[in-house]
Image (tube, rainbow, N blue to C red):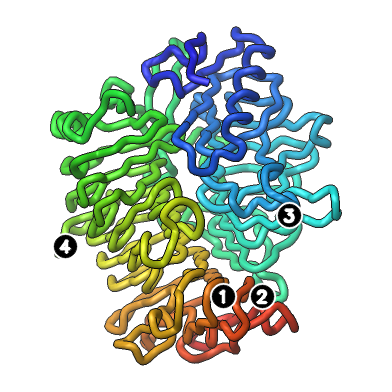
């Protein structure tokens, strides 16, 4: 699907397809259908695509598979209308199971579903499938799962993330287990399963009946800059739009007035291509004060990419993967203001890296309150496509960093996925102060999934499966071998100020009757507060369990029945 055509003959290379209304419906339909056929079940393939639409209305209906980004090139979502439909189905796994529907994205367009899909937009996804700047005009609303026609039941789904979006009608999660919505609006929200979190959303459901209704609602988003995105002017020139920093916001940024921000011409970017770009050429561009735009593909890098200039943007199109092959971090960010890293997969390489992304060197001390670094839509992955190893996924040493939709994944399936092969201690370690994360998905690492050492941390939504594969209890013990397992969410003992909302920790001890003492461990300090926690025993060897929710409190989960054996909740810690 990389043969030359009018759609992929641009500065962005053959795997970026750019459509305009002059190309004709039949041509566009043929192209997007062929991509889905190639990518529907291509979970660990090397192919990558970005499907981009110039402003206009398109009468097409298509599905979106792995490693595919779909985006409009207008300034605002309503500049591009796909009048037919864009959907994510779960045909490729049994029973419409969407729990492996990863690595795809929708951004900056409107969609109006046709009668062919009952006027409904279906986005049955799990991790690393962000929805941003969408206007869902479909009369049947948006469904976050897919019904299995053989049984009439909803297929499993384990997502998910939506930001800066408007759904005119209903959002129906159905069997979708967990979801974060930020700065969005809808006509109505139908239901929840285990953990639904809303931050700065209009018409969000009340949290008053938690845990019977699994909703956590935060009225305003304290600080955010929406993710930068690629646009095309009426004259055909490309630019990246960088939204402004905003505080205490609610609802989408583009309703009523355009999203505030600045245009950065594409000439200010080095366009990285997988067939020609190297660590040396990219670092040379960064030294020349260029931003970097990664086009779709896989990049094997023999050195770290070093960002030393304030306000540098590194932006990926079509889920580009960067792989450090020499045992170094893939990305090292200096302790400077306003860096943006967005839309990348960072895969562990064959030689063990101390971390895959380092934000600020150890001991970083500068403050960045007025111009923080942002990291968006990142997957940090240890094995899956190929064996790899790293100590830590992301290390945040700088202060005031803001994360928005991060997935730190030690692979539980795929190439190199075994206890002694894809070794990694922690998904993320936060050493900086006043770090905020919206949407932290962190799974299967061999020690603490999240280790938070810095003061003033704020977390909104947490989804974490602890490792499936400890081979025996004695090989998975913390605190010098005296405590069963490692808590998923660990706030260090010395921390005095930390707050988190909507945490879900899930167990499937597949290989041994392993126990985890606490899903969450935090210091007993007046400034440490955790709101709305749940633990779920998904499956596992008989005798496995999560013994407590937090700090020795909360009952154990250990089986599928009765219901209390499968799921436990706590409203507040400490108890209010």
Marks 1 and 4: CB-CB under 8 Å? no
Disc 2 to disc 1, how far (Cα)? 8 Å
Give the mark nearer the N terminus: 2 vs 1: 2
Give the mark nearer the N terminus: 4 vs 3: 3
- Under circle 3, the secondary element is loop
Q: Nearer the viewer, mark 3 or mark 1?
A: 3
- Under circle 4, the secondary element is loop
- Under circle 2, the secondary element is loop
Q: In the figure, 266 relative to 438: above or below?
A: above
Give residue 222's position: percent from left, percent from top.
Answer: 43, 59
The part of the image, by quadrant, that contains residue 30 is: top right
Q: Nearer the viewer, mark 1 or mark 4?
A: 4
Residue carrying label 2? 210
Marks 2 and 1: CB-CB under 8 Å? yes
Whether residue 133 appears in this view of the structure is no
Give the mark nearer the N terminus: 3 vs 1: 3
The residue at 52%/90% (across/down) is 553
Disc 3 to disc 1, how far (Cα)? 26 Å
């Amino acid at each position: 699907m990389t043969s030359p055509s009018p759609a992929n003959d641009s500065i962005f290379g053959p795997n970026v397809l750019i459509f305009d209304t002059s190309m004709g419906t039949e041509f566009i339909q043929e192209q997007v259908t062929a991509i889905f056929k190639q990518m529907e079940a291509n979970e660990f393939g090397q192919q990558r695509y970005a499907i981009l639409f110039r402003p206009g209305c398109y009468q097409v209906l298509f599905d979106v598979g792995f490693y595919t980004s779909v985006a409009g090139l207008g300034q605002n979502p309503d500049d591009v209308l796909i009048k037919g439909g864009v959907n994510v189905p779960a045909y490729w796994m049994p029973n419409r199971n969407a729990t492996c529907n990863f690595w795809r994205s929708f951004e900056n367009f409107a969609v109006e579903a046709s009668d062919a899909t009952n006027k409904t937009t279906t986005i049955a996804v799990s991790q690393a499938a962000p929805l941003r700047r969408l206007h869902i005009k479909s009369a049947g609303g948006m469904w976050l799962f897919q019904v299995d026609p053989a049984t009439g039941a909803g297929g499993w789904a384990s997502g998910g993330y939506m930001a800066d979006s408007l759904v005119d009608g209903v959002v129906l999660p159905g069997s979708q287990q967990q979801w974060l919505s930020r700065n969005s609006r809808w006509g109505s929200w139908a239901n929840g399963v285990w953990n639904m979190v809303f931050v700065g959303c209009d018409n969000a459901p009340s949290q008053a009946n938690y845990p019977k209704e699994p909703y956590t609602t935060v009225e305003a988003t304290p600080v955010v800059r929406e993710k930068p995105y690629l646009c095309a002017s009426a004259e055909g020139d490309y630019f990246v739009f960088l939204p402004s920093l905003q505080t205490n916001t609610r609802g989408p940024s583009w309703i009523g007035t355009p999203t505030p921000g600045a245009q950065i011409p594409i000439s200010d970017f080095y366009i990285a291509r997988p067939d020609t770009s190297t660590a040396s050429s990219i670092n040379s561009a960064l030294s020349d004060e260029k931003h970097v735009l990664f086009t779709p593909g896989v990049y094997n890098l023999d050195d770290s990419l070093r960002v030393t200039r304030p306000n540098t943007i590194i932006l990926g199109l079509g889920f580009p993967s960067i792989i450090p092959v020499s045992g170094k971090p893939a990305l090292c960010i200096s302790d400077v203001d306003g860096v943006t890293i967005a839309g990348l997969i960072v895969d562990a390489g064959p030689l063990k890296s101390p971390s895959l992304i380092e934000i600020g060197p150890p001991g970083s001390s500068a403050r960045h309150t007025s111009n923080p670094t942002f990291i968006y839509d990142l997957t940090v992955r240890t094995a899956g496509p190929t064996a790899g190893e790293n100590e830590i996924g992301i290390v945040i040493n700088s202060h005031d960093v803001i994360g928005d939709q991060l997935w730190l994944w030690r692979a539980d399936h795929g190439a190199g996925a075994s206890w002694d092969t894809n070794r990694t201690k922690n998904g993320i370690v936060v050493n900086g102060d006043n770090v905020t994360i919206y949407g932290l998905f962190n799974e299967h690492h061999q020690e603490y999934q999240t280790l938070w050492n810095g003061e003033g941390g704020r977390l909104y939504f947490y989804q974490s499966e602890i490792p499936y594969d400890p081979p025996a209890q004695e090989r998975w013990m913390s605190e010098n071998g005296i405590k069963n397992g490692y808590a998923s969410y660990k706030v260090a003992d010395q921390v005095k100020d930390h707050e988190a909302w909507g945490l879900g920790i899930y167990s499937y001890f597949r290989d041994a009757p392993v126990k985890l003492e606490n899903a969450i461990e935090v210091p007993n300090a007046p400034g440490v507060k955790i709101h709305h926690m749940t633990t779920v025993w998904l499956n596992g060897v008989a005798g496995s369990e999560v013994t407590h929710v937090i700090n020795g409190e909360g009952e154990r989960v250990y089986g599928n029945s009765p219901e209390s054996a499968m799921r436990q909740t706590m409203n507040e810690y400490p108890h209010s």
